[in-house]
């Protein structure tokens, strides 16, 4: 056996998002830059794919299998805009002053 | 504001800054608007800027003590992985060692900010230093289009700004290209991928010792196969000055099919024995994600110009990933330069109509950007074929396991091993087709 299996530091998503520098973190109310019509998610969406393809897990399922969205953790990648083929996602960029979003330190 | 700029550039990423540098050098007036708090604050890439155009924009950039780049590439590796093995094509050569280097690793938040500083210097040295601006922390809300259908400026931060022409350099999530109708309103998942990445700090000495680097030399390693657990896509590991950029690019449609999450796939990649040995002991200092075009030419907008407007960089889906490297930043740089050259010519001629701006399309077609994108479409499709992420890496690793293992048994010749390995993983006809396709397209 290799004495040092060399396990790398594997992080949970929460730990990863803890390493993202978000803008306007001090603000109690930031203006949402993405609006999701969850009525569409919860009536006819056959795959609910945004609940797993979003790299920041902004789309979640509750015990009743209902989709919920929060924009606060969004890292502005764009994925959900393409992945959702049901027309539920109105996607835009955060407002620099009033919105949330990222300040990459390395990128 | 009544004043009219020669040009307005939307986006201060690589395409936008390259256009700005070209305009500043020629003494044209422009306004560049970037939504990030600084140029680079919103940008993510894997991290290799290929080619020598950087030397064109910032001559002898390597002489600067603390330039915006990380390491120059003199060692390249392409790895085919199965669950436990890694079979690599590895190339190192001293011809890579002399400037102008043909590839440098970058961290965009630093690199773009540095390049923006160079553009500022060029503005200051231009004949009209007070008439061109890099404005950050402002979101462009829309393009102003007049009754005739020509772009005449932008709306941003509650104001209107006017110019003889507009260059959209807004990146892959090109909302304004959609607004003016050059991009489809809904872009489906087919021609995009999602990139996820960690920057892992090891310290300068560890990076250099572990990867056998010297001074500012660097290694690039791309991975296919088990890197994405067989899902369409691949992995990368690039050396920065004191950290590694480690990540995956996963086909969006395939990811949606798979039911997997990008962050779990990234953990599985980091835990692969070959990768684990490279990242061991490192501290993740940033996690990021961004959509990237796949390089399928069908994703490029029908047209990249209209009356008063051109689209540069990834906003026009100018990216190539044909197995050799991901090329998006060098394409952004070159297309930004070409759009600016076209703008200069058009302003000079007093005509920024589409009839004049179609010269941009011609310039792109004549450049290596469109020539390579066209020539390597077959390779792009080959790379996305299931065999590339499935059978082929498994064959290579099975072959490697037998070929490189010395035990006290009679040894089989390589051809015999190959024949056996091939039979286990892929039908003969498929194998021959794959070989023929590779020979034709690469
Ligand atoms: C994970 C990953 C790995 C990659 N690896 C590589 C690689 O190794 N090598 C390579 O060459 N390419 C790579 N790429 C691709 C490369 O990053 C892009 O193709 C390249 O960054 C495109 O440059 P750009 O200037 O066109 O767009 P961007 O770099 O996206 O810049 C667009 C700019 O416009 C700004 N903007 C957008 N909209 C507005 C608005 N409305 N108002 C104001 N500002 C706006 C943005 O804030 C941004 O600064 C990778 C991409 C990803 C995601
Ligand atoms: S894919 Fe679209 S409709 Fe389906 S759950 Fe996600 S956001 Fe809702
Ligand atoms: S843009 Fe990216 S991070 Fe933000 S909600 Fe959509 S998928 Fe998630």
Image (cartoon, coloured by chain):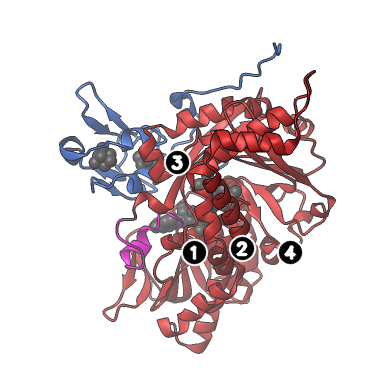
Chain colours: A blue, B red
Q: Is residue B243 magenta?
A: no
Q: Nearer the viewer, residue B7 or B383?
A: B383
Q: In the rendered structure, the residue with mark 3 lies on which chain?
A: A
Nearest-to-viewer mark from 2 and 4: 4
Q: Nearer the viewer, residue A37 or B421?
A: B421
Mark 4 or mark 1, which is nearer the start of the sequence? Answer: 1
Q: In the rendered structure, the residue with mark 4 lies on which chain?
A: B
**Residue B296 pos. (x, y %):** 47, 58
Nearest-to-viewer mark from 2 and 3: 3
Locate residue B62 relative to residue B131 in the image: left or right.
Answer: right
Mark 4 or mark 2, which is nearer the start of the sequence? Answer: 4
Is the CB of mark 1 within 8 Å of ligand 1? Answer: no
Query: Which residue is labeled 1 in the image?
Result: B32
Mark 1 in CB contact with mark 4 (< 8 angstroms): no
Q: Are marks 1 and 2 on the same chain?
A: yes
Q: CA distance from mark 1 to mark 2?
A: 11 Å
Q: Are marks 4 and 3 on the same chain?
A: no
Q: CA distance from mark 2 to mark 3?
A: 24 Å
The span picked out in magenta is B171-186
Query: Which residue is labeled 4 in the image?
Result: B59
């Amino acid at each position: 056996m290799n004495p040092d299996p060399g396990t790398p530091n594997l992080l949970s998503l929460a730990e990863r998002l803890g390493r993202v520098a978000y803008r306007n973190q001090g603000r109690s109310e930031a203006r949402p830059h993405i609006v999701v019509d969850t009525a569409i998610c919860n009536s006819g969406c056959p795959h609910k794919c945004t609940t797993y393809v979003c790299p920041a897990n902004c789309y979640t399922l509750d015990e009743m299998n209902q989709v919920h969205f929060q924009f606060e953790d969004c890292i502005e990648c764009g994925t959900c805009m393409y992945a959702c083929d049901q027309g539920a996602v109105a996607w835009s960029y955060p407002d620099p002053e009033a919105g949330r979003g990222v300040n990459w330190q390395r990128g | 504001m009544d004043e009219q700029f020669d040009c307005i550039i939307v986006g201060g990423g690589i395409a936008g800054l390259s256009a700005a540098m070209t305009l500043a050098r020629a003494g044209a007036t422009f306004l560049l608007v970037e939504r990030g708090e600084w140029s680079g604050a919103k940008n993510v890439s894997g991290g290799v800027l290929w080619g020598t155009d950087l030397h064109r924009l910032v001559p002898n950039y390597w002489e600067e003590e603390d330039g915006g780049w990380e390491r120059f590439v003199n060692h390249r590796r392409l790895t085919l992985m199965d669950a436990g093995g890694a079979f690599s094509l590895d190339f190192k050569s001293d011809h890579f060692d002399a400037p102008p280097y043909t590839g440098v690793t970058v961290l965009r938040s630093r690199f773009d900010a540095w390049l923006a500083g160079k553009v500022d210097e060029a503005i200051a040295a231009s004949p009209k230093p007070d008439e061109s601006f890099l404005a950050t922390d402002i979101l462009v809300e829309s393009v102003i289009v007049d009754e005739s259908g020509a772009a005449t400026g932008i709306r941003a931060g509650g104001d209107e700004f006017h110019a003889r022409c507009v260059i959209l350099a807004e990146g892959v999530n090109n909302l304004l290209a959609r607004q003016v109708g050059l991009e489809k309103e809904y872009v489906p998942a087919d021609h995009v991928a999602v990139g996820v990445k960690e920057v892992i700090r090891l310290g300068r000495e560890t990076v250099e010792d572990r990867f056998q680097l010297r001074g500012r030399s660097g290694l690039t390693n791309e991975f296919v196969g088990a890197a994405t657990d067989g899902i369409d896509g691949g992995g990368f590991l690039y050396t920065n000055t004191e950290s590694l950029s480690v990540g995956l690019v996963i086909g969006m449609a395939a990811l949606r099919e798979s039911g997997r999450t990008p962050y779990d796939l990234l953990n599985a990649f980091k835990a692969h024995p070959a990768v684990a040995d490279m990242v061991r002991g490192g501290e993740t200092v940033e996690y990021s994600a961004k959509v990237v075009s796949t390089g399928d030419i069908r994703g490029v907008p029908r047209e990249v110009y209209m009356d008063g407007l051109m689209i540069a960089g990834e906003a026009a889906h100018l990216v190539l990933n044909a197995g050799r490297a991901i090329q998006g930043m060098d394409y952004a740089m070159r297309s930004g330069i070409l759009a600016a050259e076209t703008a200069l010519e058009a302003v000079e001629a007093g005509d920024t109509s589409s009839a004049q701006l179609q010269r941009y399309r011609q310039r792109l077609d004549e450049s290596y950007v469109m020539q390579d994108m066209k020539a390597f479409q077959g390779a792009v499709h080959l790379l996305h074929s299931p065999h590339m992420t499935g059978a082929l890496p498994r064959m290579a690793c099975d072959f490697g396991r037998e070929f490189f293992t010395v035990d006290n048994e009679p040894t089989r010749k390589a051809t015999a091993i190959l024949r056996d390995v091939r039979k286990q993983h892929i039908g003969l006809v498929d194998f021959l087709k794959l070989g023929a396709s590779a020979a034709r397209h690469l």
